[in-house]
Image: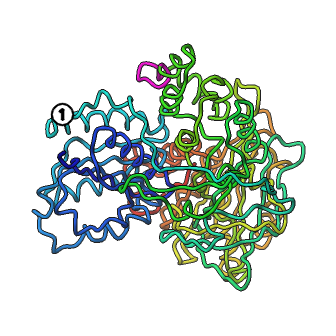
Amino acid sequence: MSEAPRLIVLYGSQTYTAQEVAERIWRKTKVLGFRGPVQAMDEYPITSLIKEEFAIFVCATTGQGDEPDNMKKFWKFLLRKNLPATSLLKLKYGVLGLGDSSYLKFNFAGKKLHRRLLQLGATPLLDIGLCDYQHDLGHDAVLAPWLKEYLSILKTYYPKIEPDNIKTTFIPRWKVSLEKCEDKTTNKKDGLTEDIYFAKGIRDSFVDATHFQVVKNYRTTHITHFQDVRMITLKTTGKTVVKYQPGDVFNIRPRNSKEDVEDLFNIFKEHNIDILPHYNLVVEECHDDMPVPPFLKQPHTLYEIAEQYWDLRSYPTQYVFSLLAQVSEDKLEREKCIELSSPEGQEDWLNYCRRPKRTVLEVLHDFHKSASKLTLEVVFELFSTIKPRSFSIASSCLPSGGRDIDLLVAVVNYKTKLLKPRLGLASNWLKDLKISDKVFGWIKPGTLVFPKDSSTPHIMIGPGTGLAPFRSLLQEREKLQTAKKDALHLIFGCRYKEKDFHCREDLERMVKQDKLTLYCAFSRDQEEKVYVQHKISENKDLLWQLISNKAYIYISGNAKNMPDNVREAFIEDVLSKTGGQTIEEARTMLKELENSGRFQVEAW
């Protein structure tokens, strides 16, 4: 029997999304008979790339158009000036970028990689795929047709493969089994269960996690306000000190709620599926090109896996329904699953899953006959993994000597057409943390970079929790005794002055001490709504003067409408009406400010 053809799938992933996409691609190529590793670019021996014939690169973009941490060495090597333009003549490849169009440098890392591979002589089998998180279908809007085209082109090199039959076989990543032991306490009465990622001394080579203890967790909004916003202070344990800059972000991996974990095991119990929370999980390799992550090689109970690894509040992709269709023995449910997993069923999937934000757990209740046939292997593929969440740090490291980190977190809780409210996984978990609870987290550079010269004017637009990175900067400048109202201009917005004016006492104190110029937009305190863009228009003369004096402009907050509205206020009122430019000239000037780093946006 001839050896399976080789196709490598390499990823650069900051929050594990690109890794999951790469594993999905690997699974599909595996069904077609290909072999080849799926691994982080920095884990791949890059000098072997000259020998490879086929490759798929899945590349996320982070920060200000930067490459992810587990791609940095790979990228640095590719940039070597002594590499000949014929280095990768043998390689035929495809690049799939994962990005978010609300950011200026959309899919920048993927585009850079694509260009560099071309410069080194590699041949693209198709155009770069640019996935956009903002699309109704998420990354799948581009991923599905892009991969279909790639595999169709691959068929010209390997005529025996049949891309159209790709859904017929289920390929698990690993061999998973259970050690059925006696029931012991899986739920600790006090504090959190042990962290499965870092507590046993395992270290991710791309993540430098630090142990923190919760010392404060209080609500900043009035009890009658519709939204709960928390100020959470984390302190390093022992003598550990962390250093960070204003604009940096704190990453933390949340956990599922006790209620959701119990709901999952109740589904198993209802269908007499022998998957119990106190059983120990055993994960082993079953493919030499799909290694088991080090932390999964450690002994864990299924309760720990359900609480910390499977994302029980994730929204089901169409792939979830293809899995359910494969195990289902109920004709009606199976047909519905096939429909929801098909290209023709995308609109139905949108209406059933994505728009009402229905979770995988809720799908298992709706398709209860199909759920009765679940196996542990299928469950492992059904749920995506809990990914780290990033929060702008709302403090400076200087006042605490590198011991404390403040987070300003809006608790996500809203209604859709579904009966139960939709709860954000990370924000609700953080809200429920108790004083003295211990968590692991790590710091990374964010998208906002502030100049060190304290005399440089700063125009900071931060409605709601968008205040966080600016609070960090203000604390630093205050500690360094360089905070001056002529240089620090903050435009803050919220609904009510008396209900959701975050950090009000500190900001008003700094104003009284001539350390800050503050403009507030309270949208609901009067009949006519006032937003941050209106404050920009009101103060267009002063803002134009600041921009003329080399001011930096920063926007931080919700990505929905605010950044675009602020951008238009600067173009129409500040740069055009006051600056005397045409609208087209104003747009060009704003673009130049962006390119020079003087107009920066952090939106989510």
Q: Residue at x 17, y 53 (%)?
A: 53
Q: Residues within 10 Å of mark 1 (few under 14, many from 20)?
A: few
Q: Position of residue 98 (x, y in %)?
A: 41, 47
Q: Is residue 574 left or right of residue 53?
A: right
Q: Does the magenta-highlighted stretch encompass residue 340?
A: yes
Instruction: Name the residue: 23% across, 55% down.
Output: 115
Visible residue check, residue 414 = yes
Residue 465 in sight from this viewpoint: no
Q: Which residues are magenta?
A: 339-346
Judging depth in this view, the residue of 193 and 273 nearest the camera is 273
Q: How is the image coloured?
A: rainbow
Can you say whether 458 is above or below 244 in the image?
above
Left or right side of 566 for 582: left
Point out the image quarter for the N terminus: top left
Which residue lies under the disc numbered 1? 160
Measured as percent of width and height from the top left, residue 469 is found at 63, 63
- For the stretch drawn in magenta, what is the main secondary structure? helix
Q: Residue furthest top?
A: 332
Identity of the residue furthest to the right in this view: 223
247 is within the stretch colored magenta = no
